[in-house]
Amino acid sequence: MKRAMKKRGSLFSFEGIDGCGKTTQINGIREDLLALGYRVELFREPGGTCLGEELRRIVLLNNGIPICERAEVLLYVASRTQLVHEKVFPLLEKGVIVLLDRYADSSVAYQGFGRLLPVEEIIGLNDFAIEKRYPGKTFFIDISVEEAEKRLSSKEKDRLEGEKEEFFHRVRHGYLTLAERYPGRFVILDGQQDPELLRKRILQAVLAEIDSPEKKDQ
Ligand code: TYD
């Protein structure tokens, strides 16, 4: 690892099935880091740029536009590559901590495992889109599909959230498979524990990664 890399900011992603509570956690961690004096930016996927927000509307609205499965992958990946090139990479160069509410692993878990598209090809698309710049740590907030369903039942569902339970079992299994494949990057967290405790654990892991002499943004 080159010494110069240490000056770079750090990248963290938050992943999980819909309803796992990651958005609450990521907002909490952002506040904690800001209170500690760090420069922090948070983006959600799909979205985070003008193009990304347009794509988000297209891909998530239940408006009846037919989107085939492979087009769906490409729309998410297009939003991602715009986000990293327009926002994330320049911020990392400036030493900012970037928190991502979903990133490359979402496409592998949802489109690869969930939709049963070829996983290795989706990983290849991600590698191309993000120039293989993976987060220092990916926090996978794990809850059971049954618990997620309970939490989401009162909410109006978007196009993906309206999928069958079986789909979310495959997505969850996808995340667990990715966590096994990339053990150095993935941190599996129990999403049913007390949210305050969860927040403390994540903050600890973020700070450990930032302070690590081996820190790198891939
Ligand atoms: P969002 O409302 O942000 O859901 P959440 O708060 O659970 O993140 O919608 C994002 C949806 O898009 C979510 O259902 C997961 C899905 N998604 C994919 O299927 N593939 C992807 O690559 C990404 C980034 C998201």
Image (spheres, rainbow, N blue to C red):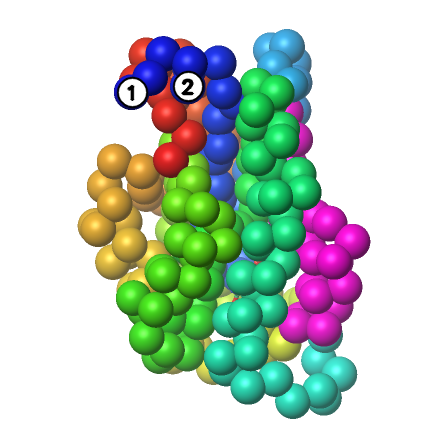
Image region (quadrant) for ligand 1:
bottom right
Q: Is residue 50 left or right of residue 170?
A: right
Residue 5 belongs to the span the image colors magenta: no
Say if 118 sits above or below 29 in the image.
Answer: below
Q: Quadrant of the N terminus?
A: top left
- Please give the name of the residue rendered at 36% of the width and 20% of the height, measured from the top-left corner: 215
Say which quarter of the image contains residue 5. Answer: top left
How many discs mark residues in the rendered view? 2
Q: Residue at x 70, y 57 (%)?
A: 52
Pointers 1 and 2 in contact (C-beta within 8 Å)? yes
Q: Which image quadrant: the C terminus?
A: top left
In space, the residues marked 1 and 2 are separated at their CA atoms by 7 Å
Magenta residues (range): 40-60
- Residue 10 horizontal/vertical position (percent): 49, 26
| Residue at image coords 55%, 86% | 68
User: How far across and how far down the image is residue 171, in percent?
Assistant: 38, 67
Mark 1 surroundings: few (<14), some (14-19) or many (≥20) residues within 10 A:
few
| Residue on which the image places disc 2 | 5
The vertical placement of 202 against 52, above or below, is above
The secondary element bearing badge 1 is classed as loop
Amino acid type assigned to the residue bearing label 1 in the image: Met
11 versus 52 height, above or below: above
The disc label shown at residue 1, or none: 1
Q: Nearer the viewer, residue 76 or 22?
A: 76
